[in-house]
Each structure stands twice: as structure tokens, then as C-alpha cells.
Image: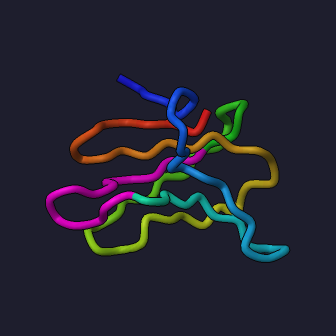
């Protein structure tokens, strides 16, 4: 079941511009250890014509470069304990 952060005070999935030409999906405030971690981040355009997927390993930063997108994206993340979440 897909869950979203609309009813939660603190959003975890954010899209951030670090510089003029660098954009990232970043999962904030989430553990990244072997017992509890983000398994993957998925980003796609609203028209669903383009999709990018990044698998993550425990202890690595939960972020994904999205420079390839020229438009607004929808992001999803999958936690090994809490399931699939979206920023939309």
C-alpha cells in the first residue's frame, strides 16, 4: 500500500537543488542501517513517460541525483520496515 506524507508533520522525501545544475531527491531523518533502511528511491515525471530507479545499500546516503529531469517529478521511497511512501 502506497503511503504519502501529506498527513504527517515532517516530510521525509524532499527534492532539493544544491546548485544551479544539481538536483537531488533526499530522504531525510531516516535510519540507513542493516536492520532499518531505505531499499530504493524512484523518481518519475508527472506524465509517467520517464522513470529512474536507484537501489540503496545500508549505510549509504539515501539520496538520488535527478539532474536528468527537466520538469517536476514525483518521488517514492521504499523502507524495508514501513513500506512504500511518496512525496505526492
Q: How many marks?
A: 0
**Residue 2 is drawn in which quadrant?**
top left
Instruction: List the single residue furthest toward the front.
Output: 9
Q: Position of residue 23 (x, y in %)?
A: 70, 65
Quadrant (top left, top right, bottom left, bottom right) of the C terminus? top right
Instruction: List the single residue furthest toward the left.
Output: 35
In the displayed structure image, the side of residue 22 where residue 29 appears, left or right: left
Quadrant (top left, top right, bottom left, bottom right) of the N terminus? top left
**Is 79 covered by the magenta stretch?**
no
Q: Position of residue 77 (x, y in %)?
A: 43, 46
Residue ID at (43%, 59%) = 29
Residue ID at (54%, 64%) = 64
Q: Is residue 81 above or below residue 88?
A: below
**Residue 50 is drawn in which quadrant?**
top right
Q: Position of residue 72 (x, y in %)?
A: 76, 44
The stretch in magenta equals 30-43
Q: Is residue 83 above or below residue 20?
A: above
Residue ID at (81%, 54%) = 70
State whether residue 67 appears in this view.
no
Residue ID at (67%, 36%) = 49
State whether residue 10 appears in this view.
yes
Q: Is residue 22 above or below residue 8?
A: below
Which of the two residues, 68 or 36, is positioned nearer the viewer here? Answer: 36
In the displayed structure image, the side of residue 88 where residue 53 appears, left or right: left
Instruction: List the single residue furthest toward the right.
Output: 20
Which color scheme does this rendered protein use? rainbow
In the displayed structure image, the side of residue 73 where residue 10 appears, left or right: left
Q: Position of residue 82 (x, y in %)?
A: 28, 39
Amino acid at each position: 500500500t502506497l503511503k504519502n506524507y501529506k498527513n504527517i508533520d515532517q516530510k521525509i522525501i524532499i527534492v532539493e537543488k544544491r546548485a544551479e545544475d544539481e538536483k537531488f531527491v533526499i530522504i531525510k531523518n531516516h535510519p540507513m542501517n542493516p536492520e532499518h533502511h531505505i531499499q530504493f528511491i524512484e523518481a518519475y515525471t508527472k506524465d509517467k513517460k520517464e522513470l529512474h530507479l536507484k537501489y540503496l545499500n545500508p549505510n549509504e546516503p539515501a539520496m538520488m541525483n535527478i539532474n536528468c529531469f527537466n520538469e517536476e517529478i514525483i518521488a517514492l521511497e521504499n523502507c524495508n520496515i514501513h513500506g512504500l511512501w511518496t512525496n505526492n
